[in-house]
Amino acid sequence: MTRVYNFSAGPAVLPEEVLKEAAEEMLDYKGCGMSVMEMSHRSKMFSDIIETAEADLRELMNIPDNYKVLFLQGGASSQFSAIPMNLMRNKEADFIITGQWAKKAYQEASRYGKANIIASSEDKTFTYIPDCSDLNISENADYVYVCYNNTIYGTKYQQVPDTKGKILVADMSSCILSEPVNVEDFGVIYFGVQKNVGPAGVVVAVIREDLITDDVLPGTPTMLKWKTHADAKSLYNTPPCYGIYICGKVFQWLKKQGGLEAMKKHNEEKAKILYDFLDQSEMFKGTVVKEDRSLMNVPFVTGNDEMDAKFVKEAKEAGFENLKGHRTVGGMRASIYNAMPTEGVEKLVEFMKKFEEENK
């Protein structure tokens, strides 16, 4: 069996150890004679799976007791609607636009109330994070919304925006569990798991309890109401059982690695290998200002579309998959999530050096 180095932005690389464990348990989970895919979500066995997953996530992120953890469906994009429906009591919210996903969340919120753009980096193709130290927060804003790590553009907030007391809502889909985060700085943290945690189909929301109420916008569907899922402990309907089971295994794997402080150190060392090469290369250039670089998503270009295409083609032939940049920006992008081994980044840099030599 040959495993490629998979630099996909999502669905993305998972820890090999987790995949092997899941393979061993595929036909018979812990002697029950069936797969997790086949068992009832109301069974004691699945209750243990989801409860352990929640407990491990709480431990990893140090989630306070006054926050609920919800395992949901519909991807992170379903929360673009759920957030305004659950939080827009004054029918107003503020948005910091740092890429396509923040923009989509803003557009969706505009359907339910007044959505204000209070900062944006669109003027420079989202290659930086705007200064968020003194934002012009709207008086009536119910919340301030950010996308914490921008998968497409490779930027990441290095400081928590000062929202002047307003609830901060963050989409952390592509940086979750890559480093510690102070949950209490946020009213809501949510993430699609398919980048750094598990298979596509699960979205996890960590929500402060006082924000989960029956006071939602009229017409809010039952399935988009957070209280529906909080009251039912994520079992209102059949959840994405197998996806949650894999997420639980990844949480346990992260604990074995030493938790989020250890992951941060590992991710910084791993990203430095690639960024250091990009900073001295004559052919390849990173596209993000240094102070706002993501540890998870590294976009880069040669400055020549034909050369970019040649690089992606030859990289694929050499066993480096999914290096083509997002269709909206072109170039290349290496997503180096938690499960990408350091060796994968070292081998990629070796290949890039060789490519540069051969194509001077």
Image (tube, rainbow, N blue to C red):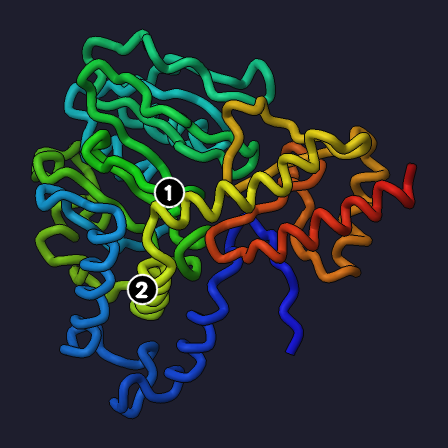
From the viewer's perspective, is residue 118 above or below residue 149?
above
Q: What percent of the width, then of the height, locates residue 211? A: 13, 35
Label of residue 78 in the image: none
> Residue 302 falls in which quadrant of the image?
top right
The kind of residue tagged 1 is Glu
Residue at figure coordinates x 27%, y 91% from the top left: 31
Give the labeled residue for mark 1.
179
Amino acid type at image mark 2: Gln
87 lies above or below 29: above
- Earlier in the chain: of badge 2 and badge 1, it is 1
Q: Is residue 102 above or below residue 242?
A: above
Q: Position of residue 152 (x, y in %)?
A: 56, 36
Image quadrant for the N terminus?
bottom right
Residue 102, how many percent across, how many down? 42, 29
**252 relative to 103 in the view: left or right:** left
Residue under the image location 12 percent in, 46 percent down: 227
In this view of the protein, which residue sits in the foreground, 137 or 116?
Answer: 137
Q: Residue at x 58, y 52 (%)?
A: 8
- For image coordinates 58% across by 39% down, the residue present is 272
Task: Say which mark, if any, is on residue 252.
Answer: 2
Secondary structure found at label 1? loop
Structural crowding at the residue carrying mark 2, measured as other residues with C-alpha within 10 Å and reported as few (<14), some (14–19) or many (≥20): some
